[in-house]
Image: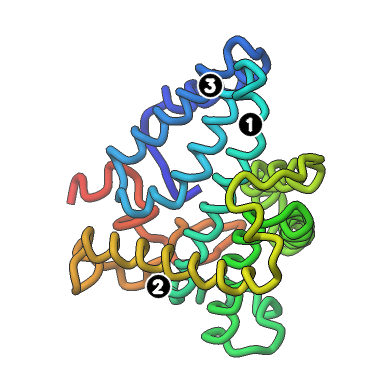
Amino acid sequence: PDLKTPAEWVSWLQLLIAALIFSRRTMPFAGLGIVALWLLAARDYDLFHLFDYLALGLGVAAYLIIEPMKDDWRVHRFEVLRWGLAIALMWSSLEKFAYPEWFYPLVLEKPFLTMGMPRDVFIPMAGIAEFTMGFGLLWTALIRRLSAIAMIVIFTSAVLPFGRIDLIGHGLITAILVAVACDQNRADGLLPGLKQKLSAIPAGLAVAIVVFMSGYWGLHLAFYGAGGFSGPVAAEKTTHSHSVEYPHGPQSDIGIGAPPTRGQGE
């Protein structure tokens, strides 16, 4: 919702991609279309922000490309979806540590979310929960199912306070979580012996945290330098543009969430 474009053909391309999904013969073209849309957004928007959409987009695109293939490849179609979603959740959860102020308007609008906790305590805790459940999607069959079910409950319950827009926005993620919860495949392709050990869970989680935090802040440093974001600074910055129906934050015509025409006519 925070990426906007004045190009009308983008909407038609999105409709075409959706139509291509209904046939196995055209599914690979739909997957390539998703990659093309991400590249288009990368051209017009901040690349670091687009990393939030990279893993999930590639996971869905890979699923659509693999689905019509022979069984040797097709058997991995749900696995790539699960990995794509897990990486996307773990990566995006780090925003709650890097930019907790982005979530202040949301907490002010819906104060009951914090359950009485200070916002600077609740937001990092939400990030830890999101990262941990995303990590759980990569572990044993039991743990990934429990993680998927927990997130299904969270995303479904969020529809009541946030409405139909939230339902549509998280629809793809919820569908993948349902597929993970219903997946009968118990095989673990990566380090199956290690995952059977209880002691490996905290160790694996710690390694994942180090890897993702190093990657997140390392790329952030490479993009923006030690001083942080070097572009124009809004008085109050948010990841989402202002909405009258769902005012999660103040309107911003610059930076993240602004249309590709930002700065024109100024």
Residue 45 horizontal/vertical position (percent): 31, 46
- Toward the viewer: 247 or 62? 62
Whole-angstrom CA distance, mark 1 to mark 2, is 33 Å
Where residue 125 sits, quadrant-wise, is: bottom right
Height in image: 225 above or below 66?
Answer: below
Whole-angstrom CA distance, mark 1 to mark 3, is 15 Å
| Mark 2 residue element | helix
In the rendered structure, which amino acid carries the disc numbered 1?
Arg
In the rendered structure, which amino acid carries the disc numbered 3?
Ala
Mark 3 crowd level (few <14, some 14–19, many ≥20, 10 Å Cα): many
Q: Residue at x 43, y 27 (%)?
A: 10
Residue under circle 2? 98
Residue under circle 3? 30
Camera-nearest label, 1 or 2: 1
| Mark 1 residue element | helix
Q: Earlier in the sequence, mark 1 or mark 3?
A: 3
Q: Earlier in the sequence, mark 2 or mark 3?
A: 3
Tell me, for residue 244, which label it has, or none.
Answer: none
